């Protein structure tokens, strides 16, 4: 993992906040299977951390919680980036020993190696490691990403170290969202927030800052014009984008407002929804 993609001058995902239908069940899963530690627990909300100080994931059981709704906008998956291949090796061995099913498989994307599975509510999770950025192939401002079978035997053989939970330098590497329309999403994320389009797939855009392979994925795989999910259904509540400084954030806010998006100040953050209803908190790097 190269930290330059998750600090100034990059704008990157900070934390993800999701709804679940059974807080105790989800907490056990995220501690025992994924390896998070509890940072704070209050009522129906638990903040989870890898380093003991910075929240990466918050789980909430809303009143009248509903199961995840299909064919809606919202979360496709959030992606936890481990510091090294040996960490991913230990994690894969841990998953195998714990009997966890990789419902969505495992892939080699050339820029990364990734494992995919769901939480008990069907919220998508990716756990991955990056290859060194010097090995990524760029052409015309676009990075080459593929989806090929992961060499699981090679990954397992990488390390015999036992898994003891998420390493302290774990970060939220990216988020992948279902949206209703890619053209509208491009206006919002590229022209409003200032992200670069770094690759495309059929029905999907991948965007980043500072030359990363992607900080955000956007797709219409749930259908063009997909509707918003219920506010109390399992899935995404909001995620945060961390700007390098207040100036960069204010420039993004100004662009969004000029494009007639509604941006609201809320404490140390600004809040905005993308055109598909995905909620975002805009914060700056020093904001806790």
Image: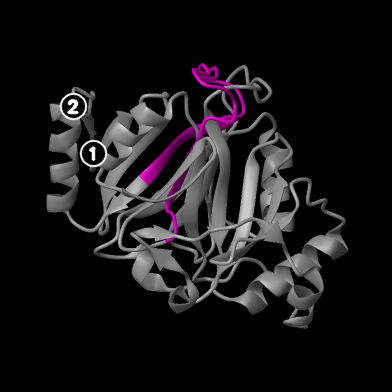
Q: Mark 2 near mark 1, Cβ–Cβ under 8 Å?
A: yes
Residue shown at 53% from the left, 30% from the top: 220
- Residue at mark 1: 191
Mark 1: secondary structure: helix
Q: Nearer the viewer, residue 270 or 54?
A: 270
Q: How many marks?
A: 2
| Horizontal arrangement in the rendering, residue 273 relative to residue 26 (left or right) | left
Residue shown at 57% from the left, 22% from the top: 223
Q: Is residue 48 above or below residue 70?
A: below
- Chief secondary structure of the magenta portion: loop
Mark 2: secondary structure: loop
Crowding near pointer 1: few (<14 within 10 Å), some, many (20+)?
Answer: some
**The C terminus lies in quadrant:** bottom left
Q: Nearer the viewer, residue 114 or 64?
A: 114
- Residue at mark 2: 259
> Given the current orientation, which residue lies at the most extreme front position?
140
The quadrant where residue 152 appears: bottom right
| Horizontal arrangement in the rendering, residue 122 relative to residue 270 (left or right) | right
Looking at the image, can residue 211 be seen?
yes
- Which circle's residue, 2 or 1, is located before the other in the chain? 1
Q: Position of residue 73 (x, y in %)?
A: 52, 26
Q: Position of residue 46 (x, y in %)?
A: 55, 43
Magenta stretch, residue numbers? 213-240
User: From mark 2 to mark 1, how far is it between C-alphas?
Assistant: 9 Å
Q: Position of residue 151 (x, y in %)?
A: 76, 70
């Amino acid at each position: 993992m190269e930290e330059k993609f998750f600090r100034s001058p990059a704008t990157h995902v900070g934390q993800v906040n999701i709804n679940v239908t059974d807080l105790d069940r989800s907490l056990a899963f995220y501690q025992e299977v994924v390896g998070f530690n509890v940072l704070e627990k209050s009522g129906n909300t638990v903040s989870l951390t890898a380093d003991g100080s910075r929240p990466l994931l918050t789980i909430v059981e809303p009143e009248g919680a509903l199961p995840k709704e299909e064919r809606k906008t919202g979360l496709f998956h959030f992606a936890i980036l481990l510091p090294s291949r040996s960490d991913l090796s230990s994690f894969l061995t841990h998953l195998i020993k714990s009997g966890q099913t990789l419902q969505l498989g495992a892939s080699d994307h050339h820029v990364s190696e990734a494992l995919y599975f769901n939480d008990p509510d069907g919220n998508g999770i990716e756990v991955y490691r990056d290859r060194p950025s010097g090995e990524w192939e760029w052409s015309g401002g676009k990075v080459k990403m593929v989806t090929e079978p992961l060499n699981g035997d090679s990954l397992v053989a990488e390390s015999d170290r036992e898994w003891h939970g998420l390493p302290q330098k774990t970060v939220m590497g990216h988020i992948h969202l279902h949206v209703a329309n890619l053209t509208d999403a491009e206006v919002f994320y590229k022209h409003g927030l200032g992200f670069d389009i770094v690759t495309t797939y059929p029905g999907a855009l991948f965007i980043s800052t500072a030359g990363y392979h992607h900080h955000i994925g956007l797709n219409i795989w749930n259908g063009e014009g997909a509707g918003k999910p219920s506010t109390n259904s399992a899935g995404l509540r909001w995620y945060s984008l961390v700007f390098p400084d207040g100036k960069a954030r204010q420039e993004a806010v100004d662009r969004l407002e000029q494009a007639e998006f509604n941006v609201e100040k809320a404490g140390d953050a600004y809040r905005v929804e993308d055109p598909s209803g995905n909620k975002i908190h805009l914060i700056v790097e020093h904001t806790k």
